[in-house]
Image: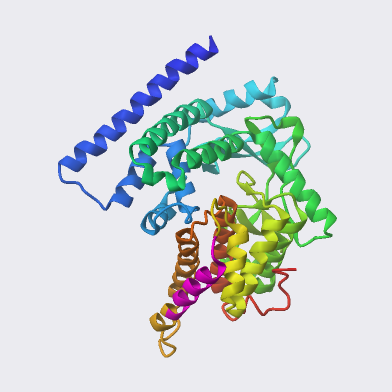
């Protein structure tokens, strides 16, 4: 019976998708024609869960998608209307298999946050601890699977009709999205990620960073009960000063913890945007939301490390060699030709940025973004395809680069002795 019900829901979902696409088409014919990237983002936001996640995937995958799309989808916000508390209560009761009152002393009916996959409510356990409950919205998995199967089929058809597109293997990208999204729907995996990261902090004697504790007796595949952290986002400079005497020191703690996880933890946090890094009331850095993590093989990390070292000293042969080790290719790549192209890129940049022009942090951030993406595109021009983990790593480096501009503008990331970037 369940499969029949899921089939009906799936058919309805395809109908919904067609309706939204039809409405977008009608508006376009009537003359409402925003630039294509914006039109696509607005359509994705109307289509809900899967497409919002797909938009975020585009934003975090500059090695796969054109720059104007990557830039536009940075604005793809995963904020969706909250569902009534009665619906959420029913899910908690179904998942726990016992009366809610036996587990929680109180639950705030007004959600702290509502995203496409889940909604978060503050609560208190009978034992007195403040917690947050992450509750998966009903029907999310059916919607995701229907949408992703639809996208996979469409991408295979498109690859057949336009073989040139298949250099990025569209269907491969959809498969990758399916894998990461289905992982995000399984809160047992997220609970395990939290425990593994907690063990990593313990094993590395790191008392300056923290991760929420999971309450297993009231967590399942669809609900996750965690310790509630009280603090402010890492970039809220005014509030941080009340918690941490030295914002720069706090940022170094966050960066060192993350860099250490690349080699000493089985995964790295792959979404360190400001909302997921908190400064707690006791001054520690809190890492939250482990729904998206990346895993990198030791030899790949060694190559990434060599790549960064080469960028720092302007060693083009070293950059080319590291890029060839990071990339995946079916043909042999000439290290000399790649190094020559990278050197040409640097010469162009020197012409673009004269020394006498005053330094603007926001411009510098864009430059760093563009330089890295141009380097990746040059690599791809030589037949290299970079794994998504490389794009995820670059994305986190760029986040930290942004935080340095806000919290420690005087700091030289590559020269600061306190940073264990490549150790």
Query: Which residue lies at the image location 38% right of the left edge and 45% below the top edge?
Result: 165
Q: Residue furthest top?
A: 1
Q: Is residue 115 visible?
A: no
Q: Nearer the viewer, residue 205 or 329?
A: 329
Image position, residue 412 (x, y; %)? 62, 79
Using the rendered view, name the quadrant where residue 201 is placed. bottom right
Q: Nearer the viewer, residue 225 or 301?
A: 301
* Residues in magenta, as a range: 333-347
Left or right: where 355 falls relative to 188: left
Quick one: quadrant of the C terminus?
A: bottom right
Q: Is residue 410 visible?
A: yes
Q: Residue furthest bottom?
A: 356
Count all numbered tags in the image, as a single digit. 0
Figure check: 395 above or below 290 = below
Image position, residue 233 (x, y; %)? 59, 59
Image position, residue 222 (x, y; %)? 62, 30
> Which of the colour schemes (rainbow, by chain, secondary structure, one colour) is used?
rainbow
Q: Magenta includes 337?
A: yes
Left or right: where 197 falls relative to 370: right
Q: Main secondary structure of the magenta part?
A: helix
Using the rendered view, name the quadrant where residue 189 is placed. top right
Q: Magenta includes 371?
A: no
Image position, residue 75 (x, y; %)? 41, 53
Q: Nearer the viewer, residue 309 or 183?
A: 309
Figure check: 7 above or below 84 = above
Left or right: where 213 falls relative to 414: right
Using the rendered view, name the quadrant where residue 21 is placed. top left
Query: Which residue lies at the image location 58% right of the left edge and 63% below the top edge?
Result: 323
């Amino acid at each position: 019976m369940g499969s029949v019900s899921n089939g009906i829901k799936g058919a309805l979902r395809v109908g919904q998708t067609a309706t939204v696409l039809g409405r977008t088409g009608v508006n376009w014919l009537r003359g409402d024609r925003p630039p294509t990237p914006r039109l696509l983002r607005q359509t994705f936001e109307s289509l809900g869960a899967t497409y919002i996640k797909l938009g975020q995937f585009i934003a975090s995958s500059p090695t796969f998608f054109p720059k104007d799309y990557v830039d536009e989808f940075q604005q793809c916000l995963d904020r969706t209307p909250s569902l009534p508390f009665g619906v959420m209560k029913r899910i908690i009761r179904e998942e726990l298999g016992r009366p809610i009152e036996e587990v929680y002393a109180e639950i705030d009916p007004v959600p702290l946050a509502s995203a496409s996959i889940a909604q978060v409510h503050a609560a208190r356990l009978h034992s007195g601890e403040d917690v947050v409950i992450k509750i998966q919205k009903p029907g999310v998995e059916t919607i995701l699977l229907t949408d992703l199967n639809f996208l996979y089929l469409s991408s295979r058809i498109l690859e057949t009709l336009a073989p040139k597109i298949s250099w990025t293997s569209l269907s491969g990208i959809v498969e990758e999205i399916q894998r990461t999204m289905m992982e995000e729907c399984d809160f047992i995996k997220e609970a395990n990620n939290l425990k593994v990261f907690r063990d990593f902090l313990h094993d590395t004697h790191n008392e300056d960073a923290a991760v929420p504790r999971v309450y297993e007796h009231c967590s399942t595949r669809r609900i996750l009960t965690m310790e509630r952290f009280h603090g402010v986002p890492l970039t809220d400079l005014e509030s941080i000063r009340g918690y941490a005497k030295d914002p720069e020191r706090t940022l170094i703690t966050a960066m060192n913890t993350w860099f250490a996880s690349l080699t000493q933890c089985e995964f790295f946090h792959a979404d360190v945007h400001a909302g997921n890094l908190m400064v707690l009331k006791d001054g520690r850095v809190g890492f939250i939301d482990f729904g998206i993590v990346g895993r990198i093989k030791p030899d790949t990390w060694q190559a990434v490390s060599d790549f960064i070292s080469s960028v720092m000293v302007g060693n083009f042969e070293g950059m080319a060699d590291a890029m060839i080790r990071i990339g995946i290719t079916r043909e042999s790549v000439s290290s000399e030709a790649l190094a020559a192209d990278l050197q040409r890129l640097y010469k162009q940049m020197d012409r673009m940025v004269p020394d006498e022009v005053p330094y603007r942090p926001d411009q510098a951030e864009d430059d760093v973004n563009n330089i890295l993406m141009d380097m990746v595109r040059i690599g791809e021009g030589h037949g290299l395809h970079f794994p998504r983990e490389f794009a995820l790593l670059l994305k986190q480096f760029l986040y930290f680069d942004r935080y340095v501009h806000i919290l420690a503008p005087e700091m030289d990331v590559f020269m600061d002795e306190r940073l264990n970037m490549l150790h």
